Image (cartoon, rainbow, N blue to C red):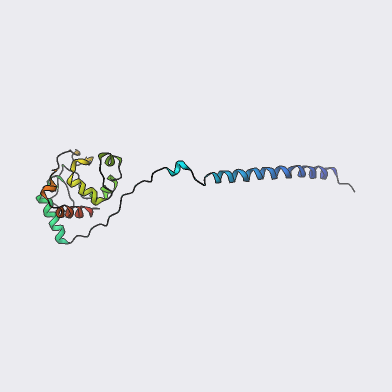
Amino acid sequence: MSQPTYIQSTNTNQQLRRPLLLTLALIGMSAFVMIFASGCGGNAAAAEIAPIQAPQVAAVPILSPDQIATARELLVSQGCVGCHTIGMFPEAQGLIGPNLTHIATEVEQIILSPEYKASGGAAVNVGQYLYESILVPPLYVAPDCPMGECPNYVMPQNFGDRMTNEQINLIVDLFSTFK
C-alpha cells in the first residue's frame, strides 16, 4: 500500500532537516565551548598586572584616661590646638590646619591616593602616616583646611627635637582612635 503524497513529502522534508539540525547543533555547541574555554587558562598579559596594595591594618590602640590626658597636654603645649580642630577637645578650635576630629578615617583614604604616593610618602597604615606627618609635615600637605587650601610650611618641622619618640607615639596612638 502506498502512502498518500502529502505524507511522502513530509517524510522527505524531515529526512533533509535532521542532518541540518544536527550540524547546526554541533556548530553551536562547538562555538559555546570555544567561547568559554578561551576565558580559561593562562593569559600572560593578565598575569603581569600588579595587585592593588591595600593599606595594612594596624590595631587601634586603647588608651587609658591618663594617656589621653597626657596626649591632650602635649597637644596644648606643642601648640597643635592653635591650628587644628579636634572634636573631643574644646580648646582645639584651630582654623589653619586640617580638622583632626576624624583623621584616622581620612588617612585610610589618603595613603591610597596617587597624590600621597607622588609626594614620596611611604606609610602603609594610619599610625605610620601620622608619625610621618608629625616628623615631616611638608611631605604631604592636606588639600582642604577650614579656611581653604592648607598652607605648606606652617606646621613646625622640629617635633622630632621637641618631643621624645614616646610622646610622638602617644599622640599617634590617640589620633589613630579618631575614626
Query: Which residue is depicted at the point 59% across and 46% down?
Result: 33
* Spot occupied by residue 22 in the image (x, y as percentages of width and height): 70, 45
Taking 159 as reference, is 51 left or right? right
Task: Report whether residue 158 is seen.
Answer: yes
> In the image shown, does 74 or 101 lie closer to the viewer?
74
Total count of labels: 0
Query: Which residue is depicted at the point 21% across and 49% down?
Result: 130
Query: Which residue is depicted at the point 83% across and 44% down?
Result: 8
The residue most toward the right is 1
* Spot occupied by residue 102 in the image (x, y as percentages of width and height): 23, 50
* Spot occupied by residue 103 in the image (x, y as percentages of width and height): 23, 49
* Spot occupied by residue 168 in the image (x, y as percentages of width and height): 16, 52
Query: Which residue is depicted at the point 25% across and 50% down?
Result: 126
> In the image shown, does 45 or 29 lie closer to the viewer?
45
On screen, residue 124 above or below 62: above
Task: Report whether residue 141 is seen.
Answer: no
Q: In which quarter of the image is residue 119?
A: top left
